[in-house]
Structures are given as structure tokens and as C-alpha cells.
Amino acid sequence: MARRERLRRALTAAGLNYCVHVYSRVGSTQDLALGAAARGAPGGSVFIADVQVAGRGRQGRSWVAPAGTSVMLSVLLRPPSLGWPRSSIALAAGLAVAEGIERAGGPPTALKWPNDCLISGRKVAGVLVETASGSEDGRVAVAVGIGCNLTWRGLAQGDRPGADATAIDLEGRPVQFDDLALSLLACLDARYRQWCDGGFEAVRDDWLRRLVWMGEEVVVRLPDRVVQGRMVGVSADGRLRLSHQGDEILIAAGDLGSGAAGGLRLSANLLD
């Protein structure tokens, strides 16, 4: 209750119209958001948990962490009917998370397509976007789930991260839970408004400035094959652009890794 009230007051002071729900322990904040959407909850509903025991990331992976070690939240959005794919909200949200980490006082944060946030080349945060179906009022609803590793202690054995994951406090600029949650929500609000006005194209330049491996050889693991090529950018609808033997390949979704990694998947969550 105390955290909800602190966040509510801070969001109100910042002019942000969110309705915050805080829980000590849940299955998944995404499930809470999707369930609320089906019952007609308004856009801007936020679900935050200290612990989630069935949290998930992209492609069915898990995202779980002990209390106090990660900011785990989901935001229910009600995007208008637009002429661009809703899936590109995920990229705009990833940009907002990277900006939110820095705005809260964290270290410089990069992006790995499609929506992982990296510090020092290791994953610190990820975004999952799911569309709700069966809403009572028939309106489209999107649940944006965010998981960000705040402190390393308790997340895994050992004092240092592995090759794939890190936490903000290990990177020299620790931040407080409430400060980070507020910052993430503020940046998401700003980038979502831009997305509503112009789709991913409206935020693409800022997104590309943070993109890792631009111009480098990369591999993308798809369900049925592995694709390799030189990364040349991201399309206006958020698809990855690769150049391979003079042809351009567009990829809507997949696991991206550096070509130097020999095709190994490098987008694992901390507890993948």
C-alpha cells in the first residue's frame, strides 16, 4: 500500500495519468493486465509485483526474481485503430526502458533488436508485448510487460554476472526501485504518445542510435532455420533488415546474436 501511494503521488505530480496496482506476490503481471483488459479496464492501468512466480519473457521464456531485485510491471494500453502494426509498440517500449534506466540515474543503456536492453553488452531488461482478446467492450488492448534487473544479489549464485545478464547496481550506478519504476512509466508514456502519432517511424531515429551490432555480421535464429547477414537497419514497421549476398532480408521476429558468437543465442533472460 505504501509503495502504491508513493508511486501514485509521484505520477500525479509528474502529470501522468496511470492507475497503479501493487502486489507482493503474483503469478504474472502480464496475466493481471490481460485479465483486467478482458474486464474492460482502462488504458494506463499498471500492475507491479515484488515477486512473480510465473513471469514470462519473449517466446515463452521465464522471468522470475526474488523480492526487491527487479522491477517487474505490466502496463495496459488501449491503442487507437492505426495504419501500422501494433507489434512495433514493443520497440518503442524498449526505447522507453533504456531511457528510463538512464533517467533514474542508471548507466548508459543500449538496445538489441527487437526489445532487449543492454548495459556493457549484457542484458539488463526486456519487454514483452501481448494483445488481449475477448474484451467485454470489444476494444483492442495491449499489455506491455517490463522486467529490469535492479540488483544482482539474490538473482544468481556468485558475485558477478555471466556473459549474458547483468543488473543495474553492478554497473556502477545503483538506483532505487520507486525511482526506476517512476522513470520507466514516464518514458513509456512519452514514447507511446509518439508511437500513437506516427508509429515506430516516429521514434526510429532515437531507437537506432542505441542499436548494437549495426553494420556487423549477425545471426538470427528462427523456428526452422538460422539466418546470417550484415545488419543494415530496421524497417519502418520494426522488422530487422539484413544484407546477405546482395539481397535484403526482412525478419519480423527471432533470436538475434552477434556473428562472432557462431550463431549462439544471446537474448536469454537471467533465469531463461
Image (spheres, rainbow, N blue to C red):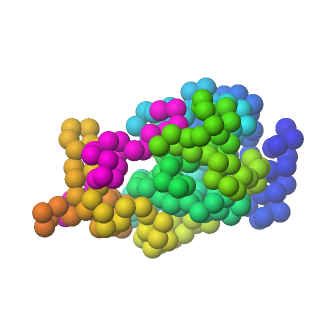
Q: Nearer the viewer, residue 74 or 150?
A: 150
Residue 134 visible? The answer is: no
* Residue 189 image offset from top left, x and y in percent: 63, 61
At a point 71% along the width and 32% down the height, the residue shown is 67
* Residue 16 image offset from top left, x and y in percent: 73, 61
At a point 63% along the width and 37% down the height, the residue shown is 159
* Residue 181 image offset from top left, x and y in percent: 71, 51
Image quadrant where residue 104 sits: bottom right
| Residue 176 colored in magenta in the image | no
At a point 56% along the width and 27% down the height, the residue shown is 54
Which quadrant of the figure contains the N terminus? Answer: top right
Image quadrant where residue 191 sits: bottom right
Q: Nearer the viewer, residue 119 or 61?
A: 119
| Residue 268 colored in magenta in the image | yes
* Residue 70 image offset from top left, x and y in percent: 66, 41
Q: Using the image, determine if residue 209 lies above or below residue 115.
A: below
Magenta stretch: give its range.
Answer: 248-272
